[in-house]
Image: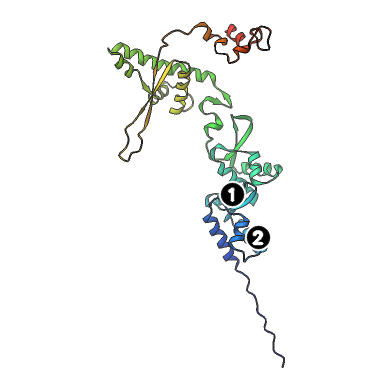
Amino acid sequence: MAEEETIVKKEPVEAVDLETRILELCKQNPDGVDDSAILVDMPQFDANQRVQAINRLLSTAKIDLLKSGNKLVYKLKDPSSASVVKGSDNQEKVVYQIIKEAGNRGIWIRDIRYQSNLLLTQVNKILKNLESKKLIKAVKSVAASKKKVYMLYELEPDRSVTGGAWYSDQDFESEFVEVLNQQCFKYLNEKAANARETLSTPIMQRNASFASSTDVWKYISELGISKVKLAVEDIETILDTLIYDGKVERSIVAGPCSSSGASGSITKLYRAIKPLIQPTGLTRMPCGTCPVFHLCSEDGVISPTSCIYMKEWLDY
């Protein structure tokens, strides 16, 4: 009787173990892991097994596929975004994650295309789908009026995108800024005048003429001249313009240090000042501050007759 041939059946490697290990690698590397890292960690699995495991993790929304530099990496899926983009395909999820990571500064379509490694037509289609689902929105940037940045629908755009209180529909509100400029100076000027009238010594007058940026902000807020909500930082921007105009000076006062040795808070104080002497006519005309004054001549490329700044000054 012939001996029966013994056949040793090879048990397939458990896919669950491979998926679990990939998830552990992603947890250990929050910035993501690439295929080479998975191969080094688990050389016993062949390429087909790794691809199947990764596809299952992607289809069950446990990991994300993102582009980092010139390579693709896998990152753990954010549970909150997994529920938000439920029903979307993998490409939509990748684009959504890229936009989410950009925060409230937004991201241009060119950068989305580069990071996702998708064609422009694909990116445009995905963006339209995400916009229709009210998951993202397009916002015009004051830095480049013809370009739009994309961010999550519920986010408030950063001031660097909208221009803050000084812009309305990407237009600089010069009149509004001028009104605030005048009112801030009026407040500081009246405070200085009141100090001179009520106090006797120069040092007391000087100290009493200072006002913090918070004081000026409260004054402007109570006037009700602004339709938009202004922050203290907005008022400090206006006060800076008064400093550049030579109408105001700033003094910084540091608060006491804490018991742990940490530095205290810093308070910015402002006061209206008067110039010691009136500026001469030369400093008021364009020639006095012109950086190419030494190149200007009657028959040269730069000349008084062709100077647009001289014409504007004379017209004024």
Please state, as top left, top right, bottom left or bottom right, where the N terminus lies in the image.
Answer: bottom right
Q: Provide the residue designation for mark 1.
A: 85
Q: Nearer the viewer, mark 1 or mark 2?
A: 2
In the rendered image, residue 142, in percent from the top left (x then y), is placed at 59, 29
Residue 68 sits above or below residue 281 on the image: below
* Residue sitting at the far bottom: 1
Give the camera-side residue of 25 and 228: 25
The label on residue 51 is 2
Q: Residue at x 52, y 25 (%)?
A: 166
213 left or right of 256 in image: right
In the rendered image, residue 216, in percent from the top left (x then y), is placed at 40, 22
In the rendered image, residue 104, in percent from the top left (x then y), is placed at 54, 38
* Precedes in sequence: disc 1 or disc 2: 2
Residue type at mark 2 is: Val
Residue type at mark 1 is: Val
Mark 1–mark 2 distance (CA, rounded to whole Å): 23 Å
In the rendered image, residue 181, in percent from the top left (x then y), is placed at 47, 18
In this rendering, the count of numbered labels is 2
The image quadrant of residue 207 is: top left
